[in-house]
Structure formats: structure tokens, C-alpha cells
Amino acid sequence: MRQLKKVGLIEMGFPYYGWLTAIQSTPVHIATQLGKSQIFYGEDGEVEYGGSTETDKTSIYDVAYMERIYLMGG
């Protein structure tokens, strides 16, 4: 995670990037290792805390949404 924080700070100007990458990718990584095809999250932080309202009418989002919104397309 330290390397991700450094990359986030130096290349993106966003030191929070390492934590955000880990918190979004770890559940997907573990579910893949365990052969699980569905993951339940407690909330969509973007909708809950004033970000994108793209998913405010649905309780489902995919990996592409996670990459675009939470990982800034990275």
C-alpha cells in the first residue's frame, strides 16, 4: 500500500489513492479467489456523501463503475 500511496501522490497528486485502491479492490480480489460471483457492500459512498448520483436509483454497480468513480479511471 505504501507504493500505491507514493504513486498516488507523485503521479496523481492524490495521496489517498493507495487506501482507496485497496478498499475497493481487496473484496473483488478475495471474492475471485474464493470463486464468489456476488459481493454485497453496505453503501455507495458516492451517493451517500454527495458525489455522483448515477446509482441512486439502483442498488447494483459493477467493476467498471468502481474503476471510474472510486479509482478515477485508473
Image (tube, rainbow, N blue to C red):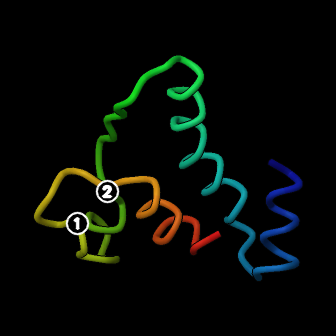
Residue 55 point in image, percent of width and height: 22, 66
Residue 27 point in image, percent of width and height: 52, 35
From what the image shows, is residue 17 above or below residue 62? below
Q: Which residue is mark 2?
A: 44
Q: Is residue 25 left or right of residue 69?
A: right
From what the image shows, is residue 36 above or below residue 55? above
Q: Quadrant of residue 44?
A: bottom left
Q: Is residue 51 left or right of residue 68?
A: left
Label 1 is placed on what type of residue?
Thr
Q: CA distance from mark 2 to mark 1?
A: 8 Å
Q: Quadrant of residue 6?
A: bottom right
Question: Would you call the spot at circle 2 few (<14 residues within 10 Å), some (14-19), or many (20 or more)?
Answer: some
Residue 41 point in image, percent of width and height: 33, 41
Residue pictured at 72% horizontal, 57% vertical: 18
Q: Secondary structure at mark 1?
A: loop
Q: Secondary structure at mark 2?
A: loop
Residue pictured at 50% horizontal, 27% vertical: 31
From what the image shows, is residue 60 above or below residue 28? below
Residue pictured at 88% horizontal, 55% vertical: 3
From what the image shows, is residue 33 above or below residue 3? above
* Res. 55 mark: 1
Q: How many marks?
A: 2
Question: Does the CB distance between marks 2 and 1 fall below 8 Å?
Answer: yes
Label 2 is placed on what type of residue?
Asp
